[in-house]
Image: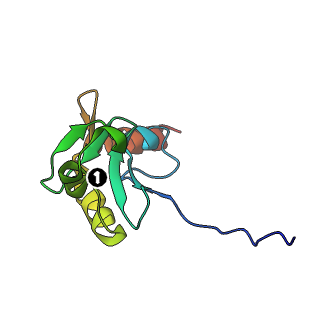
Amino acid sequence: MTTPEPTVQPVRYTVTCLPEDDINSHVFAIDVVYRGTGRWAVQRGEHACLGADGEWAQGVKEYDRGDEWLNAHRFDLDTALKLAREAAPHVKVNGYTVADAIALYARDAKEA
């Protein structure tokens, strides 16, 4: 018996407006995650999923959702990345906006 060749497939993209080396970049990030059969989810953390209507829904588990919900929250890759890019500038964390976080990063870089 011969061993089959391994396959490699990208399964996650991270979209953020903060610089990669910003310590807070990961908390302001939106992930585009592969969910199988050519469909991708747009997520904030493990608990929020972006819908086609631009609203964030709680819960990302496919097994507790019906087809209607899944069809509104799963996209082809181009659409998922577009939605993530549109949402990224509007992320808020503990009351801080992306603009606030960028300003803090710039201030810290200037002080260093």
Closest to the observer, 70 or 13: 70
The total number of labels drawn is 1
Q: Position of residue 19 (x, y in %)?
A: 45, 52
Q: Position of residue 105 (x, y in %)?
A: 41, 42
| Colour scheme | rainbow
Q: Residue furthest right?
A: 1
Closest to the observer, 50 or 109: 50
Q: Residues within 10 Å of mark 1 (few under 14, many from 20)?
A: some
Q: Residue at x 34, y 35 (%)?
A: 47
Q: Residue at x 30, y 37 (%)?
A: 64
Whether residue 44 is situated above or below residue 17 in the rendered picture: above
Q: Is residue 54 left or right of residue 43?
A: left
Q: Is residue 56 left or right of residue 39?
A: left
| Amino acid at the residue labelled 1 | Ala
Q: Residue at x 27, y 68 (%)?
A: 79
Can residue 61 be seen in the rendering of this structure? no
Whether residue 2 is situated above or below residue 49 in the rendered picture: below
As helix, strand or loop, the secondary structure at mark 1 comes to helix
Can residue 24 be seen in the rendering of this structure? yes
Whether residue 110 is situated above or below residue 16 in the rendered picture: above
Q: Is residue 105 left or right of residue 4?
A: left
Q: Quadrant of the N terminus?
A: bottom right
Residue denoted by label 1: 88
Q: Residue furthest front?
A: 1
Q: Position of residue 37 (x, y in %)?
A: 41, 65
Q: Quadrant of residue 60?
A: top left
Q: Position of residue 40 (x, y in %)?
A: 37, 59
Q: Residue furthest top?
A: 94
Q: Residue furthest left?
A: 53
